[in-house]
Amino acid sequence: MTEIIELEKKVLSENDRLASAIRNQLKAHHITALNFVSSPGSGKTSLLEKTLGALKDQLRIALIAGDVQTENDANRLIRAGGEMVKPMVTHDACHLEANMISGILPEFDLDKIDLLFIENVGNLVCPSSYDLGENMKVVLISTTEGDDKPAKYPAMFRRASVMVINKTDLLGTSDFDMDRVKKNALGINPGLRIFETSCRTGDGLDEWYAWLKTIVTQN
């Protein structure tokens, strides 16, 4: 057991070293990077599709689309108008790691990027431990999931800076309680910025787009 713990510490230490180098590289090019994390089906790709459609003519957006076995999400994002989209197939690995990001960054012209989205693998456990060199983590949940997600996966919500509550158009079709999920999340991380969105109706998306443009300007 001790050997396993020491190996995990070594792996995370090397990951953090690479993440720090990535962060410095992105900062030198004035790139804002967001690491999108969620359980499967929360709507990460849908939100990114909408964001591309709304902001592709205002911001230079690049995307790394992580997936376990396919390039389906990357292809969706390209069809949505993404001109700088790279798939990252993990082949059964349950999260992205910094070495994966550092390996794919040379495929981008960093001087032509304002905003980098990293779409992580659908998982609220492993990705919480791995820094990818991002400015912040954005955790998505949806109203079709349990409102106890923050309580069940506190590490992810503690390390995130932003929570997006997606699929608000489906409120009322389950027992999901908006006030309860916010209370759970803010009890773990009082500094969380919270957005409520529906990719189907467009509710809340303008606020999300405005925030993205603000953080890019501030970087």
Image: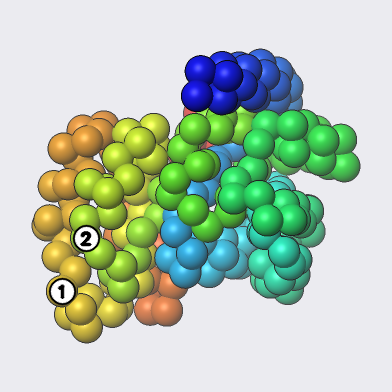
Tell whether 134 sits left or right of 190: right
Q: Nearer the viewer, residue 163 or 7?
A: 7
Q: Residue type at mark 2?
A: Asp
- The span from disc 1 to disc 2 (Cα, nearest Å) is 8 Å
* Direction from residue 7 to residue 179 in the image, left or right: left
The structure residue drawn at horizontal position 19% and vertical position 40%, both measured from the top left corner, is 186
Is 215 on the left-hand or right-hand side of 64?
Answer: left
Q: At 56% across and 25% down in the image, what residue appears?
A: 4
Left or right of residue 212, residue 153 in this image: left
- Please rate how many residues cluster around mark 2, counting C-alpha atoms within 10 Å: few if below 14, some from 14 to 19, many from 20: many
Residue for badge 2? 147
Task: Tell me the kind of residue under disc 1.
Answer: Asp
Disc 2, SS: loop
Against 21, residue 79 (above or below) is: below
Of residue 4 and residue 206, the one placed in the foreground of this image is 4
The dot on residue 175 is: 1
Q: Residues within 10 Å of mark 1 (few under 14, many from 20)?
A: few
Q: Position of residue 46 (x, y in %)?
A: 53, 69
- Which percent across, then down, holds residue 88? 75, 52
The answer to whether the residues at label 1 and label 2 have Cβ atoms under 8 Å apart is yes
Residue 213 appears in view: no
